[in-house]
Amino acid sequence: MTPNPQLSDSGALRHLLTIEGLSAKLIHSILDTAESFVSVGEREVKKVPLLRGKSIFNLFFEPSTRTRTTFEIAAKRLSADVVNLNVSASSQSKGETLLDTVDNLSAMGADMFVVRHAQSGAAHFIARHVAPHIHVVNAGDGRHAHPTQGLLDMFTIRRYKQDFTKLRVAVVGDVMHSRVARSEIHALTTLGVPEVRVIAPRTLLPTGVEALGVQVYNDMTQGLKDVDVVMMLRLQNERMSGPFLPSAQEYFKYYGLTADKLQLAKPDAIVMHPGPMNRGVEIDSSVADGGQAVILPQVTYGIAVRMAVMSMLAGT
Amino acid sequence: MAMQLPDPEQLLNQLAAALKPRLRGNTALVGIHSGGVWVAQKLRQQLGATLPLGTLDISFYRDDFSSVGLHPQVRPSDMPFAVDDAHIILIDDVLHTGRTIRAAMNELFDYGRPAAIDLVVLIDRGGRELPIAADLVGTRLDLTPNQNIQVTLDPNNNLKLSLHER
C-alpha cells in the first residue's frame, strides 16, 4: 500500500486532500479543535495569533464565493496573511503551467495553498510538488473531493445529532457530478453511520456507487423514510439540459425536497445543503427557510472547521 | 530523598481565606485548563457560588506553536461574563516559566479590557523566564529544572500532587 500523502510519518495531518483514508479518530480530533474555534468566533475579538507571520494563498482556478470567503475569514482569524488569486483570470490565460504558478508563489514565501481546481487530482499534484514546509488544502477538485465541506457537514451533524452510530442519513441529488457527495459519504461511513442512503435518478448516479457502502434509492418517498439527516446536493445548471435530465421542473417534481416529502423523515430530521441553492429545483423555499434547515449554521461552522484544519496543518 | 509534598486541599483552604478580602463587586474567577480550572472550581465552592467562573484554554496563544504544533486536545474557552471592567482573579495550578500566564492574559484581552487581573496559583515552583509574579501563592517549592510537579484530580474529586523526574 502506498503511504497516505496527506499524513506525516508520525500520522499527523500535513495536507488535507481528501477524507478518504483519514481515521475516525483524526476526523473527530479535527471536529474537536473546530469546537474550540466556534467559541473564538463568538468573542469580541475573533482572532487568535496562531498563524501570525504565515502566508496563505487561496488559489482558485474555478469560481467560488462561499468557500473562498470562508477560507479567507478563517485564515484572517488565525492572524495569517491571506492572498486571494483568481487564477483563471491571470497567468493561466497567459499560458503559465500550474506548477510554474505554484513555484512562483512559493518563491514569494507561501506557507500554505488552498486550491480549488476543475481538474480532479490538482491538489494532490501540487502537494507532491511543493517543498516539505508547505501545506496544501483541497478546496474542491473536479468531481473528486471537497474535504472541508465534508468535515463541516460532519461538524454540523455532530452538533445537532451527537452520536453518528445511531443515524440514518440520506444524500439526495446529483451524486455523479458531486465532489461534495463523495466527501460526505466517505466521512459518514468512516464515522460509523450505520445507514447511508443516496437518493437520485439513475442518470445521476455513478456506476458502482454501492461500493462506497451506501444504499441506493431512486424514489424520494422510500429513501427519505425515517431518516435523521437529509443532505441535499446542488443540481448544477449545466446538468439541467442534455442527456441527464428532462427539465428542472420535472426534477423538482420527483427529487426536489418539499415540506410534504420532508414529512417522511423523522420529525426532528435536519436538512443540509452545501450551497449555492437552486430554490425550486432541488429544494423548495419553504424547506430551505424552514425550522429544520441548518444551512446557514453550516456556513458559520465552516469557518471554525477551516480554522481547525489550517492550524493543524501549520503545526505539523 | 523524597521531597515532602504539601496537602493540596489544605493549600486551597489557605488560598480561599486569603482571597476573601480581595473580592469586589465586579470580581470573576478564571481558571486555566486543566489544573487551574479545578483549583478555580474548588475556590469558588468556598468563596460563594455566585462568583462568575470562566475557563481558558491557552492552546491558541502558546508561544511554542511553531515548534510543537497545536495541542491535540484543545477545549473551548468559556467566559460567561463581560470581561470589560471586570476584576479578574486568574487561577492556575502551577506557576513555572510564566509563559502560560502571558498567553492567558493575551487571550483575556481578546474578550475585553479587564479593570484588573490578580494572579493566584496553588504552587509556585520557580524557574521564571518572564517578568511575571503571583499575587497569592498556596506554597512555594524549590524544584530543579529536571523536576516536574503535577496536579491531578482523584476519583473522589480531591486534588493530588505528584513529583516526577524528567
Image (spheres, coloured by chain):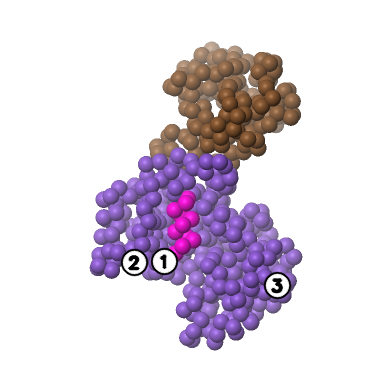
Chain colours: A purple, B brown
Note whether residue A147 is visible: no
The answer to whether the residues at label 2 and label 1 have Cβ atoms under 8 Å apart is yes
Task: Report, in whole angstroms, how far the alpha carbon at label 3 lies from the one at label 2.
Answer: 40 Å
**Res. A280 mark:** none
According to the image, label 2 marks what residue? A88
Under mark 1, the amino acid is Pro
To which residue does mark 1 refer? A63
Query: In what quadrant of the picture does the C terminus of chain A appear?
Result: top left
Taking the image as shown, residue A23 lies to the left or right of residue A160, namely: left
Give the Cα distance between marks 3 and 1. 32 Å
Tag 2: Cα neighbours inside 10 Å, few (<14), some, or many (≥20)? some
Crowd around label 3: few <14 · some 14–19 · many ≥20 (10 Å): some
* Three-letter residue code for mark 2: Ser
Name the residue: 54% across, 48% down: A34
Q: Amino acid at mark 3?
A: Ala
- Residue bearing mark 3: A259
